[in-house]
Amino acid sequence: MIFRLPTLFFLISFFYYGFNSANAQITVCDSCEFTSVKAGIKAAKPGDTVLIKAGLYKENSIIIDKPITLLGENLPTIDGEDKGDIIQVFADDVTIDGLKLINVGSSYTEDYAAIRVSRAKNFVIQNLELRKIFFGIYLEKAREGIVRNNNILGDAVSEHNSGNGIQLWYSKKIEITNNSIQKVRDGIYLEFADDCRITKNLSKDNLRYGLHFMFSNDDVYNDNVFENNGAGVAVMFSKRIHMKRNKFQYNWGTAAYGLLLKEINDAEIANNIFEENTTGINVEGSNRVNYTGNTFKNNGWAIKVKGACYNNEFINNNFLYNSFDVSYNARLNDNKFHQNFWSEYTGYDLDEDGFGDVPYRPVKLFSYIVNRTPETIILMRSLFVDIIDFSEKVSPVFTPDNLLDEAPLMKKYSW
Amino acid sequence: MVKIENIHKKFGKNEVLKGVDLEIPKNGIFAILGPNGSGKTTLIKSILGMVVPDKGKIFIDGKQTHANGLYRKNIDYLPQIANFPSNLGVKELIKMIQDLRGGSANSDHLIELFQLEPFLDKKLSNLSGGTKQKVNLVLTFMFDSQLVILDEPTTGLDPIALLHLKELLRKEKEKGKTVLVTSHIMSFVEEVSDEIVFILEGKIYFKGNLSQLREKTGEQDFERAIAHLLKKNHA
Amino acid sequence: MLKILKYSFFDLIRSRWSYVYLLFYLLLGFVLLFLNEDLSKAVITLMNVIIILVPLIGTIFGVMYYYDSKEFTELLLAQPVKRSSIFIGQYLGVSLSLVMSLVLGLGLPFVFYGLFESAAIWDFSLLLVTGSMLTFIFTALAFNIALYNENKIKGFSYAILMWLFLAVIYDGLFLMSLIVFETYPLDKFTLIATVFNPIDLSRILILLKLDIAALLGYTGAIFQKFFGTNVGLFLALGSLMIWILLPVLNIYRKAKKKDF
């Protein structure tokens, strides 16, 4: 029901506009009656479409305070000349479509954005190209809107003077889909944003996180690709987040993760692919999280568990050629590993039920040592380390002795 | 031919040569004798440069020996124990030594002499001790150097081969060569040598020909004369 | 020297052990590829073999050859050949024949399985280069040990001990000291300690190209600088070269003074 409501609104508004906008189209171009976007909007009545022809418009602080459609033809450019917000939306039922917005200008005190939607609902922001931005699309206290097919490319070099691609603050039921976001601080940032759906986006080469949740609940993100971000994807202090079929890849670096979970409860993490990250998933203080059908391939650490994590279940995941499969910094384990595939498993399956007859211990002593003294990583894959790992495997002293997969899969799990 | 000046050599605490002075003239067979551990082999090896003396000089044909060992081109040496790379065949070994030394070499008559033809293609590891020694002899005598040094040449030889060896030595001497030989077989020494050098505890104890030895010891029998030398020293 | 090298080399490649060694690697290569089918995965498994087995075999062959060819050496010493040529020639003969067995033994299966079309070719080449360098290093070290020990049993024991020390014990001490001094900045110490063990050095060199380059960067700025760039690669290769040069120079030096 939740997501049908905006659609319904949409249909209604479509009919509403349909009757009114046939003859209420205002055109903006160099040689038109209206030569500036601002003037066009000023002249428009609610429900009108302001059509902007191709060209360069040097304007900023364009305020939309009535339900209109701002439509670009052949991608007109609005140049904010580094003076702050370019378009501000304060009204419901606004559509912004097909524009190129450049030169937002940065500030240490104000979060300037290419498009700011404030206390509005039922908006559609689509087919935009954003360049040289500070913040891209900034939604504050907005509801039931759609952000789709936008291409955001920043030029962020350092975290403190760059902004986020798409930022949600106290917003609800926003759909963010098919966007491409690159080279900003956080690709998509959600703070106090609930019931949002984030799907099929590409978030790449961002300075900090590809996707960042803070204090946001009941959100879903599926089928996204997060690649080569400074620190991967961070989900913090949030509840009931669903993460499915995403790809987290090539997040290499000193503090880089595929996915960082901090104080996350009741989440579902299913069928994702984590490939070539320094750490696949870094978990801190997260409870009742289900990990199923994920593939961890060629990561430094597939899963790093820090601090107290209770009642988490890892079932039917594939752990392939990671330097370390699971690392714990405590001796305590209250998590369940069951029926996963481990490429390092050396046991056998005599009864041929598809599960190894000998349990697998995913935590190595060496990973425990490396957690304690990081420099010891230099001894990885040395004979001595293999020997101590083996002896720890035989009789666990330092690692949780109940942490084992009783029924490791003999073949890769596929879904 | 060979001139040795004040050679000293220690192996650890064991002083093997304690100032040896020796001059070996051209042409003739010189036997170096002495009890086990008296320093015979060390002396020979010093001449060859295989042992580096702690002190002293060695001249061959008036030229001081050089550490690079290239002067060995003019020395034919027969080592004490013949043990060769086991994977090589006899023919290959002969070729190899020829290759290493360069110059002309004539091994055919020697192979014939010691009847080594059946063994030419065999690997050295499969040969008996005596046959190896024959190969060793071939390797030594196939070159035509002026100085020949033989360390225990009689080891393992059958009587016929021994005869051939004596014959060889005689011929070499006729060619005007200088032959240096050590042996424990007294009859052999007595038969072939022109001059004897007796080493005892790292020093030259006696140098002279057989008659001088008999004179000095008052013993007619060679073996007894040698025994006398030894006894006198221990007395 | 080239003549000595030639004879030692041919002597060795005709010996049974070279074939055993070659066959072992052929078998290993084929089995690994057969089991894995994934070329880059096989390269990782091979690394474990190479950094442990290659030094061991280099050590054993080196010592064995030295003692076995003692009489041959004496024979050569009586010839007009420089001493250093004899030993360096023999050393090169042993190490080259070992290197040849290694390269052929591992190379053939991999070529057979389509190495040239694979992206793993660089990793694999690095593996072979490292393996070859380790052979040179450990054969040289073994020759050194043998040169200093007349007693065969003693020399053999020392050589095996040296291998054991560098392959296992060193890393144990290294790990222990890292844990004991964990409160101090350790990255410089770690790098230096690595350079002092050719096995560690080779392991790092291979791992740099495989999985831990970035993992190492995890631990600190110096590591990152060292392992993140090609500086590490060249430094490690350079240090391995020094590891070859120093023992060989010592063979040269010792051979000049030694009595036979």
Image (tube, rainbow, N blue to C red):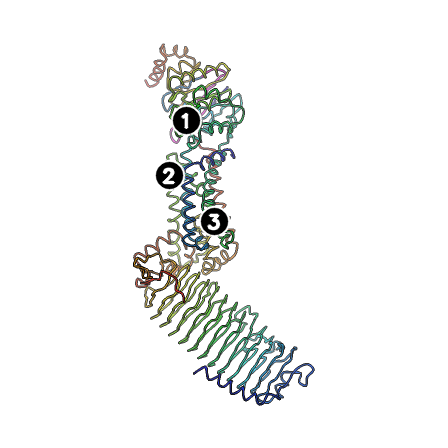
Disc 2 residue type (three-letter): Phe
On the rendered structure, is B95 left or right of A71?
A: left
Task: Give me the C-alpha separation between circle 1 and circle 2.
Answer: 24 Å
Disc 1 residue type (three-letter): Ala
On the rendered structure, is A65 left or right of C37?
A: right
| Chain holding disc 1 | B
* In front: label 1 or label 2: 1
Name the residue that disc number 1 marks: B82
- Does mark 3 fall on the same chain as mark 1? no
Q: Disc 3 or 2, which lies upstream in sequence?
A: 3
On the rendered structure, is A341 left or right of B24?
A: left
- Mark 3 is surrounded, within 10 Å at the Cα level, by few (under 14), some (14 to 19) or many (20 or more) other residues, namely few
Q: Secondary structure at mark 2?
A: helix
Verify whether residue B12 appears in magenta.
yes
Closest to the observer, A95 or C208: A95
Rendering coords of residue A336 (x, y %): 33, 67
Rendering coords of residue A98 (x, y %): 59, 78
Closest to the observer, B65 or A381: A381
| Chain holding disc 2 | C
Task: Give me the C-alpha separation between circle 3 and circle 2.
Answer: 37 Å
Q: Main secondary structure of the magenta part?
A: strand
Q: Secondary structure at mark 3?
A: helix
- Does mark 2 fall on the same chain as mark 1? no
Name the residue that disc number 3 marks: C112
Q: Which residues are magenta?
A: B6-29
Name the residue that disc number 2 marks: C156
Rendering coords of residue B116 (x, y %): 43, 23
